[in-house]
Amino acid sequence: MRKHPRVDTTTTGEAIHYVKKDLHTQAITHDIRSSYQLLIYPRASESPSLLPIRDVSYTSRKQLPIQDAHVSRKISCLPIRILPTLDKTPLLDYPSPPDSNQQSTYAQRDTTKYCRFHKENGHETSKCFQLRDHIETLIREGHLKDIVFKKVDRADGQKDSRQDGRARKLSPKKAEDEGAINNIFRGPATGKSNRERTQEIREAMEARRDLDVNSIEPDPKRIKEGWDPIIFTEADSHGVDVRPNDALVISARIGHREVHRILIDNGSSADILSAEVYDQLRLDRKDLQPFPTPLRGFGGVEVMSLGTVKLPVKIGKAPCQKTLLLDFVVVDTENWPYNALLGRPFLNKAKAVTATYALMMKFPTEYGVGVVKGSQEMARRANLSVYKDREVHQVYAVTTKQEVGEPEELVEEPREFELDPKEEPEVRKDEPTEEVALDPEDPSRTVKVGTSLSVHVKAQLVMLLRDYKDVFAWSHEDMQGVDPRVISHHLSINPEFRPVVQKRRLFNPERSIAIKKEVEKLLSAGSIREVKYPEWVANVVLVKKKNKQWRMCVDFTDLNKACPKDSFPLPRIDQLVDATAGHELLSFMDAYSGYNQIRMNKADEEKTSFTTDQGLYCYKVMPFGLKNAGATYQRLVNRIFARQIGKNMEVYVDDMLTKSTTAEKHSEDLKETFDVLRKYKMKLNPSKCVFGVSSGRFLGFQVHQRRIEVNPEKIKALEGMASPKTLKDVQRLTGCLASLNRFIAKSTDKCAPFFRAIKKGKGLEWSKECEEAFQKLKEYLGRAPILSKPVVGEILYLYLSVTEVATSSVLIRLEEGIQKPVYYTSKALLPAETRYSPAEKIALALIISARKLRPYFQPHTIEVYTDCPLKLILQKPEVSGRLSKWAVELSEYDIRYTPKAAVKGQAVFDFIAEFTEPDAEVRRMMEDEQTSEFQ
């Protein structure tokens, strides 16, 4: 075996041993004669070829006795820890300072380090070999007996693996057998260099050895006052459903705002804040500090941050609160369901302890243990909002020696959601129709016309359609577009938002072909153009249509965030449906790619840029998916159809309907509509238009001449729905019922078991009560009431109902002595409202109905059927201040109060349910009213 050279020094008479520096060496020993072992770690500042093991600069060293070879002792405490204790005793023998002709070896190498033992620069006290030797000498002489050593017993004849001056190195096979996992990921997210991280690892190892010193008394100056013990018990998990393994999601105050959906993740080495929350805090992105280290999630996908910012975070409730100043890494990522993430830096700084079983976090404060409870509702909402293959489980910082490059492109499925704010228009098949050819030279160009028309009316209608065949578009090439002088779409981008270039997504071959075809079609139609160096770039998204074809949209998520909302009002669907009913003939029309018929403002075209395999393109026309596209389109139709809306036409965005009170007048009304379309060069989609029918589907309702019915497809979908098994199934059920509330009497009472099943703090508990309510609801909707349209000037009647959980009402009208419902309303009572007196609850039911049915209360006289003396209560509102406020609000309407009359309609019969026993207050009011009548 090759031996290391020994180089003698003449100035001290001692020997300095050198060894060839081995990159794999973890520790070496300095003297084979001593069984006292000191661990010495190589420093990066040493010579690459020779590494000094000992540096002996004093001559008064005593000979060390030979110890028992069968017992090896190791000092596991840093000398710097023992030095303060020795300084108070006469045992410490400080070395004499070097003369002018002799400079310390370390002093020549590094002037930034200081040794308290030598009282000179050159090395650190914790790395001073002479101090270690001096401590060994004192121990061998019997001093410092209070220091406890770790003994390593070895069998006779067993050789110390480190006595040959080299560190023990495990072979690959041995390392594999021992099964130790040394490294999983790199962190933490501090942006430090590899050298700084290596130094931190060494300090951590030394601190670990310090834990083995049990008998050294701690420094009194460093003892801090402890905190109350943090304990979790079974009671902490009360009310928590542990089956779904929900994440710990809390709320906290960040900066000056209360922020919800904050994920607590002890697997993250960074505290993260979403860019959207950062913007809502009204902070300038220019104030962000650079943070070049990328964040890496589980799976290795890297994300670059916008920078870091220091923000105060307040957790807990008074008095057990804690406010911390945290370094947040601000990240702008799409589809991240959380507003912020608090990782190990926060948990360590707060000394917080989490219990995911109880969804709770506890931390010490000056006034006791603070508690923060997680919200299962927020956790599940966040879980539902995560799209497929977009989950992030852990986040940590990555530091690489070379410059970080672009991560490898990953093939990912685009989000399956509709970017068009309007549902896909469908061909209406509510009434028998026939195809009528508009061009004799091209029989394929047809439209649908109702078959129940008289011969004369049908002939007039067909002739009109053929005369105005130019208002239909059969392809994109037929669209001319609305003149930009009439309207164009402007993007009012907030200058505080910086442009975003989305990372390009890859698609499978089928979708790539569909994108290519759509791009070619839009190019040939002049709807898009190529663009160079755009500041905003978005990805395309493909959505399956009902006909199994692909619709291409653009994900303008980032662009929409930068645009303020256009508050232009859209029409109320209820009012449009009511205005449509009661007409003899109807014609339903749909614009051909209506949004694309409006031009983009020239200066804003490049902001709509999107990327494909073929290149970069931007829209010359208004595309689907822009935030305020619907408002712009509604502004256009309100302007061009201003003379017709409310008279013989109703328009909701690009859904248009022409109505006529008589069949003979329908062609004349349609001609007026076609003239406007021709004037402004707006085109209709012939495949989605139906002309001359007495009923049809409009905005989700089935509209007839004298009635309004539930959309049969919605009823069919509900009847075919299986009993909910998951939280998402219940949410889907309640969402479906929300669009049918107008037809459901006491809908809140009927749905109360569903809401209790998903009550906050509980999981899904689909009980027998829920199943019975579900089946009864299906049965009810199978015979859902038919709503009637009020006649101008007639009196409408209102029934009120109050239960323990909700207030409800039904507005009815009399037709030939029969009570027919117009509108059902229902609203759940708030916790404070459940404590109202019965009289106040009845008054509350009336005020809620008046607010909901305001379009009916204003033009009609309303008679309220109730046995409660509402008139007396509202005229003498000294009982409570809220009654006085309600009385003023109701004074603008013409309301009469009438005792309940006989029910003359089956639809109203099941609705009526009020208090059977009025309480003392109501009884007193009734007696006072009767007394006043006799006076």
Image: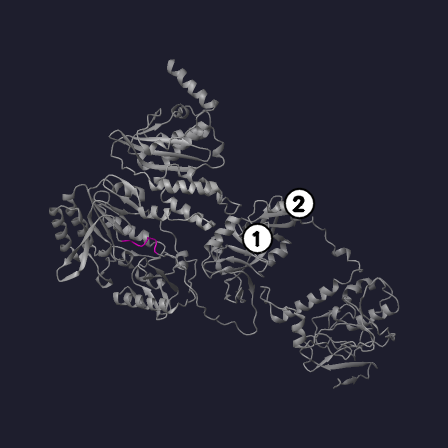
88 or 931, nearer to the observer? 931
Q: Is residue 804 left or right of residue 715?
A: right
Query: Measuring 66% from the left and 45% from the top, which residue is drawn there?
Result: 367
Magenta region, main secondary structure: loop
Magenta range = 420-426
Image vertical order of residue 172 relative to residue 817, above or below: below
On whether residue 254 falls in the magenta region, the answer is: no
Q: Nearer the viewer, residue 687 or 95?
A: 687
Residue labelled with disc 1: 312
Residue 197 point in image, percent of width and height: 63, 68
Residue 136 sits in quarter: bottom right
Which amino acid, mark 1?
A: Pro
The residue located at (48%, 70%) in the rendering is: 407
Q: Nearer the viewer, residue 609 or 580?
A: 580
Q: Which percent across, then down, holds residue 542? A: 36, 62
Residue shown at the point (21%, 51%) measured from the top left: 690
Which amino acid does the dot numbered 2 rest on? Answer: Tyr
Contact, CB < 8 Å: mark 1 with mark 2?
Answer: no
Q: Which residue is mark 2?
A: 367
Q: In x, y percent, where is residue 769?
A: 47, 40
* In front of the other: 226 or 506: 506
Answer above or below: position of 164 versus 513: below
Earlier-in-chain disc, 1 versus 2: 1
